[in-house]
Amino acid sequence: MNTSTIVILDFGSQYTQLIARRIREFNVFSVVLPCTSKLDEILSYRPKGIILSGGPCSVYDADAPPADPKVLEQGVPVLGICYGLQFITHHLGGKVRSAEKREYGHAEVSVVDAGTELFAELPAELQVWMSHGDEALELPTGFHLTAKTANAVAGIADAQRGIWAVQFHPEVQHTKQGSVLLKNFVFGICKAEADWTPEHFIQATVERVREQVGDGHAICALSGGVDSSVAAVLVHRAIGDRLTCVFVDNGVLRKNEFEKVQKNLRENLGLNLVAVDARERFLKKLQGVTDPEQKRKIIGNEFIAVFDDEAHRITQQTGGVDWLVQGTLYPDVIESSSVNGPSQTIKSHHNVGGLPETMKLKLIEPLRDLFKDEVRRIGRDLQMPEDILERQPFPGPGLAVRILGEVTADRVALLQEADDIVVSEIKAAGLYRRIWQSFAVLLPVKSVGVMGDQRTYAYTCAVRAVHSEDGMTADWVPLPYEVLKTISSRIVNEIHGINRVVYDVTSKPPGTIEWE
């Protein structure tokens, strides 16, 4: 890729992907690699700069991530963040210890060296976000203090070596002017150019897919959502009629979704679409299963099995299918920990987890390095309809991860109706495009109610609505009282089998957006 690139080495921080996101917002390409990556792989990107992320470990622990300290000796500008500062200090001869006063959350940092390039155009006092239990006690030879808090070192630098570091997290929104600091590193220190744009991504991806597939044929796993639709259009632009899109009814789609998606994709996008009704097949596999991870794995494996079956059918018409296109995004990869060394697995995703070893199709994942908002920008440059691009995210395992406990046809029917009411009322209130996700969850909890002077004993429905930028973090939405009142009233009055509605007021973290 002939663009300026910043390589981010991930030491296991949940914020690592925010660093990548912030840099891409500058139209500079960034790539996240495990901290255990070989030096040759890191340098193969010809990085303009290298960023060392935060992480949960202590650098002096025996099980600290085994990154190569030679990354600090390549003449490429380096920025350490949180654990990255401690890594630099520890491996260049300084001393790191457990802090007497740990710092978590909001903190005030004083810049003591305003002349350092990293703090250019920043005030002397910064409001930042801290998250550390260790501190740099002694700095390596050649380094000097650039910033501090009341309790600890907050910034160090050795400009001669081309190494800078901060103890706080400039990538999170709680650090109010963190983007300025990152811009100072990317443009002022690394001299990167803002040459990574949607147009460049589309051109590079189309060329790569065309070369990857050659004269072969591909099938695309279409859900009708933003990700798979954009992936399909990109691959269609690369190989045209040699792409066949497959849309599967897995029995846990939203109300009338199977019919709506077919109409939308055929008429609005002109894609060659095969629709497969596999409801009974999936529900049979899910029978008696209550564990969330098992549900995800079952659905992921069954998806691939269905696609494999369809590939055999399509082979008779095309002469062979070698490739499977999926709309996997960066957050899917991150949360499944498939690329990021010490990052902790939050939950597996059907796109990146549980793929059977016997799968005969090779994967094409054109969006694997993108966040959701980037995918939407790509879609707009591809001139795709807004009603597709603005659809709220929907999980690959569908309603199965919104039905706590066993997934049955009856429970699916209940949740489809409840979810349809939630979404329709939020749209009617003009809030749909302002909310990241809004949906209903069916709980395996029954409670006593009274309707028409008669006792009822029925399920509880939870309503969830969150604001987010990319799904990595989220805040619950304080929906207007009248909207909640209407949703609750409609659900309990229109759906026989649900007699209680509750509202979820949990952010991510500590919760996840989906309930499973």
Image: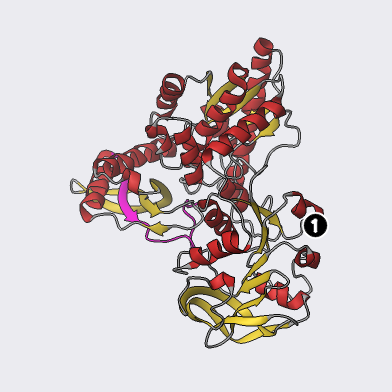
Q: On the rendered structure, is 176 left or right of 156? A: left
Q: Nearer the viewer, residue 478 or 500?
A: 478
Let me know if residue 498 is in the magenta part.
yes
Total marks drawn? 1
Queried whether the magenta region covers residue 24, the answer comes back as no
- Residue 6, quarter of picture: bottom right
Percent of width and height locating residue 315: 68, 15
Rendering coords of residue 276 (x, y %): 54, 22
The location of residue 175, given as percent across then percent down, is 47, 69
Q: How crowded is the residue under tag 1: few (<14 C-alpha within 10 Å), some, or many (20+)? A: some
Which quadrant does the N terminus fall into? top right
Tell me the residue that label 1 is attached to.
39
Residue 207 visible, this orientation: yes
Q: Residue at x 52, y 77 (%)?
A: 104
Q: Quadrant of residue 478?
A: bottom left
Picture residue at 39% right of the left edge, 40% below the top: 415
Magenta region: 495-516
